[in-house]
Amino acid sequence: MSAAPDPMIGKTIGNYEVLSKLGQGGVGTVYLGRSSTGQHVAIKMLHDHLTKQDRARSRFLREAEVLSRLKHPGIVQVLDFLQLPEGFFMVLEFVRGETLESGVRRLGCFSWSRAVPWFNESLDSLEYAHNQGIIHRDVKPANMLIQMNGKMKLLDFGMAKLKDARQQLTAPGMTLGTIAYMSKEQLLGKPLDVRSDFYSLGVSLYEVVTGNLPFWSENDRELAIQIARTKPKLPSIRVPKLAGKPEQVILKAMNKAPEDRFQDVATFKAAMLESLT
């Protein structure tokens, strides 16, 4: 049996025509759209059942607020936000490319020399966000898009933390993000700073250049225990060419204690570039 046609296709939402479905996640569905001026856009629609949940609705609104603050070539731009009888919609710039998650799934892994420029561009984007008082909290290959021109863009600030936010969107003891990429302090619900994003970037780097996550279990509790207590398998065991400086960069970014990680973007980037020599 063929799937039922998506009722959104062909509709006009505000000034945007919905052309096709691009993808779907736990929070919403993303469509390719076209503005009244002919510009292609991405339209992110919050799932119907989540529009009735205060926390989910607030997170969606918060993502729109966060992205509206960020004007950087390495971060996807929000163009419009619509609250209509049909639902909640965020209109974003449409970027052609492939996520690192998809690339790893397709190719197995990337070489160190190919990955370093992408991750240094991601560090530039994170530094800009951090300077605006924003911590991403969900850095992972699925949220890192390689554009057609080879440049990197960061996606999905739906879990981002605003330093000046007055509204608490997580219940006590609740964590947000994807467990496999979370820092120990994020898992424990402790206050976060930029070094938590550095940890997540380190895990992403490990996965992209080895083809494997450093920690994995289908049981979330077991996975959290591994992240909190277990040393990761050396990347060079999986890919011998990573021995030496590349491996040292990955492991430093992934230290359990924030004070043992890179403390700023400049130091992290310098270590990445030095590892290429």
Image (spheres, rainbow, N blue to C red):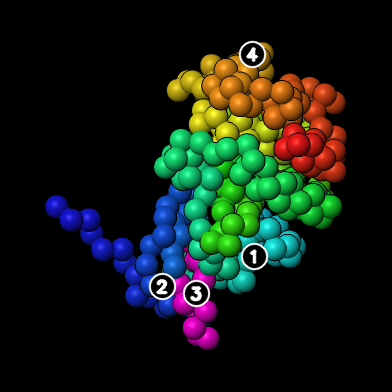
Earlier residue among tags 1 and 2? 2
Residue at which label 4 appears: 230
Q: Secondary structure at mark 4?
A: loop
Q: Quadrant of residue 247?
A: top right
Mark 1 and mark 2: Cα distance apart in space: 19 Å
Helix, strand or loop at disc 3?
A: strand
Q: Amino acid at mark 1?
A: Gln
Q: Is residue 81 left or right of residue 271?
A: left
**What quarter of the picture does the C terminus occupy?**
top right
Residue name at image x 58 percent, y 38 percent: 111
Name the kind of residue labelled 2 in the image. Val
Q: Residues within 10 Å of mark 3 (few under 14, many from 20)?
A: some
Q: 139 or 189: nearer the eye?
A: 139
Determine which of the numbered discs, if any, sits on residue 18 in the image: 2
Residue at the disc numbered 3: 40
First in sequence: mark 3 vs mark 1: 3
Which one is nearer the viewer's eye here, 77 or 170? 77
Q: Position of residue 200 (x, y in %)?
A: 66, 35
Q: Who's the residue at 45% across and 72% down the image?
A: 33
* Above or below for 148 versus 16: above
Indicate the secondary structure of the residue bearing disc 2: strand
**Type of residue at label 4?**
Thr
> Which image quadrant for residue 12?
bottom left
Answer whether residue 81 is magenta in the image: no
Q: Is residue 204 visible?
A: no
Label 2 near label 1: C-beta < 8 Å?
Answer: no
Q: CA distance from mark 4 to mark 3?
A: 46 Å
Q: Give the extent of the magenta segment.
A: 33-49
